[in-house]
């Protein structure tokens, strides 16, 4: 049996205290040293039988162990990919990875595509996500362009609305959330385990990115949360792109907050205000103060309205 470091034992105990089954106690939580800018390292914690949450690789990654191999929901950043994949295999006692879901095109979700794609792994994404990855993506909120991906790194299985599959005896539903965080956002719902991965549509402890330059917009973000709220119940563990696990009640609170901001920004837009003038009205007043400066979020949210009629919401 692998000896569990005290820090990881304490982390596993915290997860158990939260009501999560400690299915991988014999393996222990894996803590690996990664790049210097990932100070906490890559950590694992059980979500349900055969399902593990992996953090520290640039985004939350969910690993689902099936009889044919391992499925990953998102792949972290490319610079952490090797260590992430090794950690996932060790934490689940699995020999190989068969499937990778890209919940959208961002680097934090698609960083393992090339490493896995060249080995023939099934890469599943929304059609729009694949289309973005075929070109150079140059958006103002990123310091440098991203892509295009080589053919083997592109998603090799796409969908447009809602699809189902099974991983062992775990029913898996994945579906499209239209124009929300991007225009290719998908969720992955593990029904038996009652684990719902919301990708970039869900935030836990920070203001999200509304990537309006690749199709995201604030009313779509609200609509995406509506999709997830409808799927979830009071016991669903909801995995955001970053940060801790959330509940359905937390999603409902976020939905209320974002709709309030949307409504305030629409009023600014109809008055003909510029982004700077809209920010001066303090559209996030009284909302999520612990999340820090909302200026980047509000700027993107306001600009996201330019391509939409207010009636679209």
Image (tube, grey):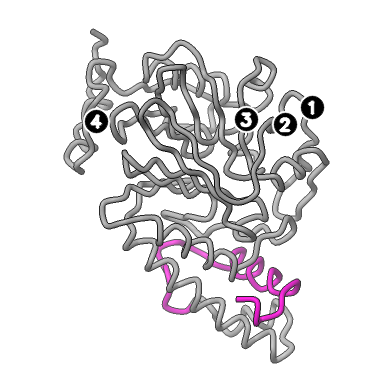
Number of marks in picture? 4
Look at mark 2 in the image and give the residue it sits on.
154
Q: Residues within 10 Å of mark 1 (few under 14, many from 20)?
A: some
Q: Which residues are magenta?
A: 285-313
The residue that label 3 is drawn on is 123
From mark 2 to mark 3, how far is it between C-alphas? 7 Å
Q: Which residue is mark 4?
A: 12
- Marks 2 and 3 in Cβ contact (< 8 Å): yes
Q: Residue furthest right?
A: 135
Which dot, 4 or 3, sits closer to the camera?
3
Q: Residues within 10 Å of mark 2 (few under 14, many from 20)?
A: many
Give the Cα distance between marks 4 and 3: 30 Å
- Label 4 CA crowd tier, 10 Å (few <14, some 14–19, many 20+): many
Which residue of the protein is positioned furthest toward the top in this rendering? Answer: 1
At horizontal 61% and vertical 25% (from top left) the residue drawn is 122
Of pointers 3 and 1, the one earlier in the residue sequence? 3
Q: Which mark is residue 140?
A: none
The residue at the point 77 percent across, 43 percent down is: 131
- Looking at the picture, does residue 288 appear above or below residue 140? below
* Classed neighbour count for the residue bearing mark 3: other residues with Cα under 10 Å, few (<14), some (14–19), many (≥20): many
Secondary structure category for the residue under label 3: strand
The earlier-in-sequence mark between 4 and 3 is 4
Q: Nearer the viewer, mark 2 or mark 4?
A: 2
Q: Which numbered marker is on residue 150?
A: 1
Left or right placement of residue 196 versus residue 109 in this view: left
Q: Are marks 3 and 1 in contact (CB under 8 Å)?
A: no
Mark sitting earlier along the chain (2/4): 4
Callout 1–callout 2 Cβ contact below 8 Å: yes
The residue lying at 26 percent from left, 10 percent from top is 2
Q: Percent position (x, y) of residue 303?
A: 71, 71
Residue 117 falls inside the magenta stretch? no
Quadrant showing the N terminus: top left
């Amino acid at each position: 049996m692998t000896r569990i470091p005290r820090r990881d034992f304490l982390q596993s105990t915290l997860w158990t205290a939260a009501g999560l089954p400690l299915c991988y106690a014999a393996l222990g939580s894996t803590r690996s040293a990664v790049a210097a800018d990932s100070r906490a390292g890559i950590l694992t914690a059980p979500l349900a039988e055969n399902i593990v949450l992996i953090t520290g690789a640039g985004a939350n990654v969910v690993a689902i162990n099936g009889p044919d191999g391992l499925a990953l929901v998102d792949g972290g950043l490319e610079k952490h990919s090797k260590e992430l994949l090794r950690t996932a295999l060790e934490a689940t006692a699995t020999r190989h990875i068969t499937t990778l879901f890209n919940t959208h095109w961002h680097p934090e979700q698609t960083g393992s595509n090339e490493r896995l794609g060249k080995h023939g792994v099934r890469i599943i994404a929304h059609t729009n996500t694949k289309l973005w990855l075929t070109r150079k993506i140059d958006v103002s909120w990123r310091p440098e362009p991203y892509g295009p991906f080589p053919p083997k790194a592109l998603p090799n299985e796409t969908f447009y609305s809602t699809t189902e599959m099974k991983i062992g005896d775990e029913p898996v539903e994945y579906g499209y959330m239209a124009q929300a965080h991007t225009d290719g956002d998908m969720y992955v719902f593990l029904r038996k385990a009652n684990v719902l991965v919301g990708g970039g549509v869900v935030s836990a402890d920070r203001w999200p990115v509304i990537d309006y330059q690749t199709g995201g917009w604030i009313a779509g973000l609200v609509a995406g949360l509506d999709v997830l709220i409808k799927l979830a119940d009071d016991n669903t563990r909801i995995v955001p792109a970053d940060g801790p696990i959330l509940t359905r009640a937390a999603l409902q609170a976020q939905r209320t907050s974002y709709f309030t901001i949307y409504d305030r920004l629409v009023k600014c837009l109809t008055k003909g205000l510029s982004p700077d003038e809209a920010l001066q009205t303090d559209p996030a007043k009284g909302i999520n103060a612990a999340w820090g400066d909302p200026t980047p979020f509000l700027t993107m949210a306001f600009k996201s309205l330019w391509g939409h009629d207010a009636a679209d919401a």
